[in-house]
Image: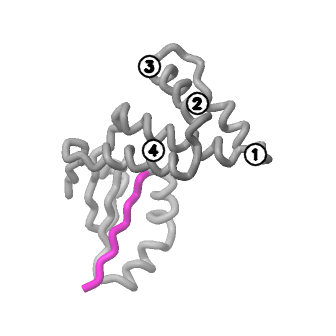
Amino acid sequence: MTKLGLVITDGVGYRNFILSDFLMAAKSHFDEVIIFSYLPKEAYKGLDQRIIVLDALKESFTTWFFRKAKEIAHLKRNRHNNHGIQDNLKTNYNRNWSTRGIATRFIYLMTHFFNSENSIGVFERYSFGVLKSPAKRSKAKSF
């Protein structure tokens, strides 16, 4: 028995997979298609499909910090001769005095020195490590 798990995270995924012919084609190739979704069950009314609704993943500050550090380090590493990346770096700079604003400025300073592939990998491992913690896992609800 072959199964396909389809994860729908947002409206774009819903449009691309649910509102298109993808499900019909998938049903012809797999014995069962299971949809894992972050969207509410009301979005799937009239759809004869097994759907598992996932709880929204709330990102902790620590996870956000390392994800943002990885993102900014990657952008800084590849900014040379790329006006789109340079514009993105200017746009994402935060001048607010909130906790996140101060942390963002610290990330910009830190990634000025630490933007190598190795540094990016360290930021990524830290962010994944925080996500793997058992307390952070969400429980799925099936209907």
Q: Residue at x 72, y 37 (%)?
A: 87
Answer with left or right where residue 106 lies relative to residue 63.
right
Alpha-carbon distance for marks 3 and 2? 14 Å
Q: Given the image, on which type of amino acid does mark 3 rest?
A: Thr
Question: Quadrant of residue 3 in the image?
Answer: bottom left
- Return the residue at label 1: 80
Q: Given the image, on which type of amino acid does mark 4 rest?
A: Phe
Total marks in image: 4
Mark nearer the N terminus (2 vs 1): 1
Mark nearer the N terminus (4 vs 2): 2
Q: Name the image quarter holding the N terminus.
A: bottom left
- Determine the secondary structure under disc 3: helix
Q: Estimate how packed mark 2 is, as few (under 14), some (14 to 19) or many (20 or more) residues with alpha carbons within 10 Å.
A: many
Q: Given the image, on which type of amino acid does mark 2 rest?
A: Tyr
In front of the other: label 3 or label 4?
4
- Return the residue at label 4: 123
Give the magenta-colored segment's residue range: 1-9
Q: Is residue 141 magenta?
A: no
- Return the residue at label 2: 108
Q: Is residue 97 above or below residue 38?
A: above
Give the color scheme: rainbow, by chain, secondary structure or one colour.
one colour
Mark nearer the N terminus (3 vs 4): 3
Q: Given the image, on which type of amino acid does mark 1 rest?
A: His
